[in-house]
Image (cartoon, grey):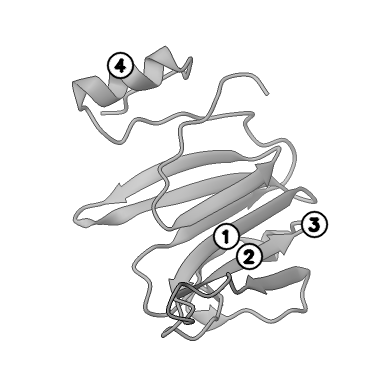
Amino acid sequence: MGPHTLAVALLLFVTRTGASEVPQSNGGEPPMATTVVRERGKFAITCKVPMTHVPLWLKDGVPVAQSQGYHLEQEYPFPVSNGSVSHIFMRLSVERAHLSHAGHYKCSSFSPHAHRIVVVAGKAPQAVTVAVTRDREEVFDTLRRGVSLFFLE
């Protein structure tokens, strides 16, 4: 797929097909990744939330329903040694993205992590790489893995 994409992984991850991902920093808040996907393309977002949170996907602050092209899944891992389950894995996927799928997604109203989906008509960029740190060791480690870096001022 051309240049590799550097992704910042917190508790929110993205699987994409033909999409570009750009991590962004919001001041003191956790970085918000942005995925650019072509109209009629695929995208998926997964996250891990504590069992104490209601398993709910939000798009622009509004609950997402199974309809409108969304496929929602939840996975409860095996119980830990004391018999309890501490978290839930959630996945939101879209097989055919429409312009209406663009927005800010969160997997729980309590989660500070969000993901922005940008749907574009026509062809989306193949890959965009943005460094969200200027830490020298992290930059060199990234370059050793063969990822191209571009610093934005």
Q: Secondary structure at mark 4?
A: helix
Three-letter code, disc 2: Arg
Neighbour tally class for label 1: few under 14, some 14-19, many 20 plus, Cα within 10 Å: some
Q: Residue at the location (42% across, 58% down)?
A: 11
- What is the C-alpha distance between the residues marked 4 and 3? 36 Å
Q: Is residue 39 above or below residue 149?
A: below
**Considering only order in the chain, which callout, 1 or 2, is on the residue closer to the N terminus?**
1
Three-letter code, disc 3: Glu
- What is the C-alpha distance between the residues marked 2 and 1? 4 Å
Q: Secondary structure at mark 1?
A: strand
* Residue 64: x %, y % from top left: 63, 79
Q: Residue at the location (48% across, 58% down)?
A: 115
| Tag 2 and tag 1, C-beta contact below 8 Å | yes
Q: In this figure, which residue is indicated by the disc labeled 4? A: 140
- What is the C-alpha distance between the residues marked 3 and 2? 13 Å
* Residue 111: x %, y % from top left: 38, 72
Residue 103: quadrant of the picture? bottom right
Q: Residue at the location (47% across, 79% down)?
A: 61
Q: In this figure, which residue is indicated by the disc labeled 1? A: 46
Q: Is residue 141 above or below residue 92?
A: above
Q: Residue at the location (19% across, 56% down)?
A: 28
Q: In this figure, which residue is indicated by the disc labeled 3? A: 95
Q: In this figure, which residue is indicated by the disc labeled 2? A: 91
